[in-house]
């Protein structure tokens, strides 16, 4: 370059920046909404320089704190709300990090392509609208959290993201315990149950189960601080306060898997089994817990499920699944499209269409057909195998065990619950699993990787 000249790349950058500023000013003068695309472009461009720890902490805390503010009919609405804005921000940040760092690019593109295909199937089934694509965007934002965690390099490690989960959930957990003590919360089937700041006790239970397991990991593998042990007890009590059978079983599976997968003596594994037994006994001895189990077992002995779901949540689930299977049979290969079982409103012909499926396996079979269900199962199998390999390496063993324990609990929860629809819990799990997967892959690529003893 001649002395005194101007670098061509610098000149091009200045021209682009000037164009963006002029365009932003013109857009704002016309309408604030017209500035959204330019603001999104700037967010993508700045993603690599954003402080990810406070950003993700604020996003998860806000999402937990505002979860109960959405109305029951919000999934049938195209209105922009804080949850949608948060999802958009996460997707844009993930795009920016992928553009600059390109780690996990193939997997991210495959997930985005799959979601796009089944969003298109939903549009063909129900017509083009913001309501039709909202479930695809929401699930894309969950994948975006994992992409951000995977591309964050040293900005996010497992102790930091588990602390983020603790901070994000502590207010909701304390409120849930307060609701238990004051016999308040929300009425579900005539029972008063704690929900904290979440939309439903089941949502709260899954998030608290994740936070409990993360706190146990911090205590056992990240310093044995009394604060983490106290937080583990707080989140476990908050899980019990929801009296969610699905959520409580999820907690037991996570703790049992965490204890069994960790290396160590038989005494250590017996301690984990003892903790599971204590929690199970506490649930059985509590009046609300024993009443819920008694109601479910008596309903199961009574016979066929009720059309309107009277009797118990178990009988309602059986009836809901019976109504969904014929829907799958009408389109067995590609399904009806992502979110169609969630956004459909109840009608005179379908009294359960406005209710959630309460089984992620049934939901994905109906929405994505055999092809989508097989692709999802293959992806989950590959993820578990990769984490299990990391369990055999010294540096990534601890992270892999925590991620596997969380996945074990969530896969069990998905049998009879709307696991992936619990957005704050899904964000928390994606954050931890994304960091754990990055740790495992970094260890496997390292020439000094050693097997764990």
Image (spheres, rainbow, N blue to C red):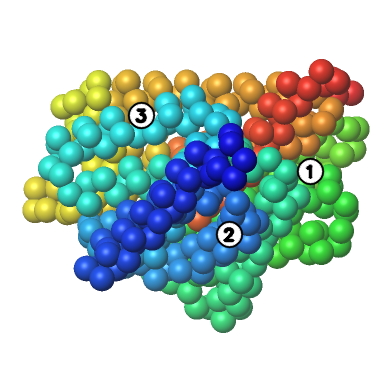
Q: How far apart are marks 3 and 1 (CA)?
A: 39 Å
Q: Is residue 176 above or below residue 300?
A: below
Give the secondary structure at mark 3.
Answer: helix
User: Can you tell which of label 3 and label 2 is closer to the viewer?
Assistant: 2
Residue under circle 2?
Answer: 55
Q: Is residue 81 above or below residue 12?
A: below
Q: Residue at x 80, y 59 (%)?
A: 229
Q: How far apart are marks 3 and 2 (CA)?
A: 27 Å
Q: Which numbered disc, 1 or 2, marks the residue that appears first in the sequence?
A: 2
Q: Residue at x 36, y 29 (%)?
A: 113
Q: Residue 313 at what x, y percent from top left?
A: 38, 52
Confirm or deny contact between disc 1 and disc 2 (CB under 8 A): no
Q: Which residue is drawn at 55% across and 76% down?
A: 179
Residue under circle 1?
Answer: 272
Q: Which residue occupies the foreground of this view, 44 or 438? A: 44
Q: Distance between the residues labelled 1 and 2?
A: 34 Å
Q: Which numbered disc, 3 or 2, marks the residue that appears first in the sequence?
A: 2
Residue under circle 3?
Answer: 114
Q: Is residue 422 visible to us here? A: no
Residues packed near mark 1 inside 10 Å, few (<14), some (14 to 19) or many (20 plus): some
Tag shown at residue 20: none
Left or right relative to 188: residue 154: right
Q: Residue 102 at what x, y percent from top left?
A: 55, 31
User: Can you tell which of label 1 and label 2 is closer to the viewer?
Assistant: 2
User: Can you tell which of label 3 and label 1 is closer to the viewer?
Assistant: 3
Quick one: quadrant of the C terminus? top right
**Quarter-of-image position of residue 72:** bottom left
**Quarter-of-image position of residue 282:** bottom right
Give the secondary structure at mark 1.
Answer: helix
């Amino acid at each position: 370059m001649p002395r005194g000249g101007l670098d061509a790349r610098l000149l091009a950058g200045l021209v682009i920046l000037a164009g963006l500023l002029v365009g932003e000013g013109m857009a704002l003068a016309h309408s604030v909404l017209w500035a959204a695309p330019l603001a999104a472009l700037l967010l993508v461009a700045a993603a690599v320089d954003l402080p990810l720890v406070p950003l993700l902490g604020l996003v998860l805390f806000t999402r937990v704190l505002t979860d109960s503010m959405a109305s029951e009919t919000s999934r049938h609405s195209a209105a922009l709300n804080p949850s949608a804005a948060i999802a958009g921000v996460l997707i844009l940040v993930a795009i920016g990090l992928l553009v600059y760092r390109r780690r996990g690019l193939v997997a991210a593109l495959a997930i985005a392509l799959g979601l796009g295909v089944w969003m298109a199937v939903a549009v063909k089934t129900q017509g083009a609208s913001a309501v039709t694509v909202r479930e695809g965007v929401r699930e894309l934002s969950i994948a975006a959290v994992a992409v951000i965690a995977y591309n964050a390099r040293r900005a996010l490690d497992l102790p930091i993201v588990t602390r983020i989960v603790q901070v994000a959930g502590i207010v909701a957990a304390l409120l849930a315990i307060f609701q238990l003590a004051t016999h308040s919360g929300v009425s579900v089937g005539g029972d008063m149950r704690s929900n904290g700041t979440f939309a439903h006790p089941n949502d709260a239970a899954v998030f608290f189960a994740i936070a409990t397991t993360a706190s146990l990991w911090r205590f056992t593998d990240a310093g044995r601080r009394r604060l983490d042990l106290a937080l583990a007890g707080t989140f476990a009590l908050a899980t019990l306060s929801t009296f969610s059978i699905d959520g409580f079983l999820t907690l037991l599976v996570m703790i049992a898997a965490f204890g069994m997968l960790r290396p160590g003596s038989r005494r250590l594994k017996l301690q984990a089994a003892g903790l599971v037994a204590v929690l199970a006994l506490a649930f059985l001895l509590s009046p609300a817990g024993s009443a819920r189990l008694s109601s479910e077992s008596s309903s199961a002995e009574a016979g066929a499920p009720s059309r309107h779901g009277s009797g118990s949540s178990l009988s309602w689930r059986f009836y809901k699944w019976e109504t969904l299977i014929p829907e799958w049979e009408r389109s067995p290969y590609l399904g009806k499209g992502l979110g169609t079982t969630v956004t459909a409103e109840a009608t005179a012909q379908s009294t359960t269409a406005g209710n959630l499926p309460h089984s992620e396996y049934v939901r994905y079979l109906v929405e994505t057909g055999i092809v989508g269900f097989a692709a999802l199962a293959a992806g989950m199998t590959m993820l578990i195998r990769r984490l299990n390999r990391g369990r055999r390496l010294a540096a990534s063993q601890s992270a892999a065990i925590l991620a596997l324990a969380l996945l074990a609990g969530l896969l069990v929860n998905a049998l009879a619950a709307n696991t992936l629809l619990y957005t704050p819990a899904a964000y928390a799990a994606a954050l931890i699993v994304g960091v754990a997967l990055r740790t495992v892959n970094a260890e496997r690529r390292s020439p000094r990787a050693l097997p764990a003893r």
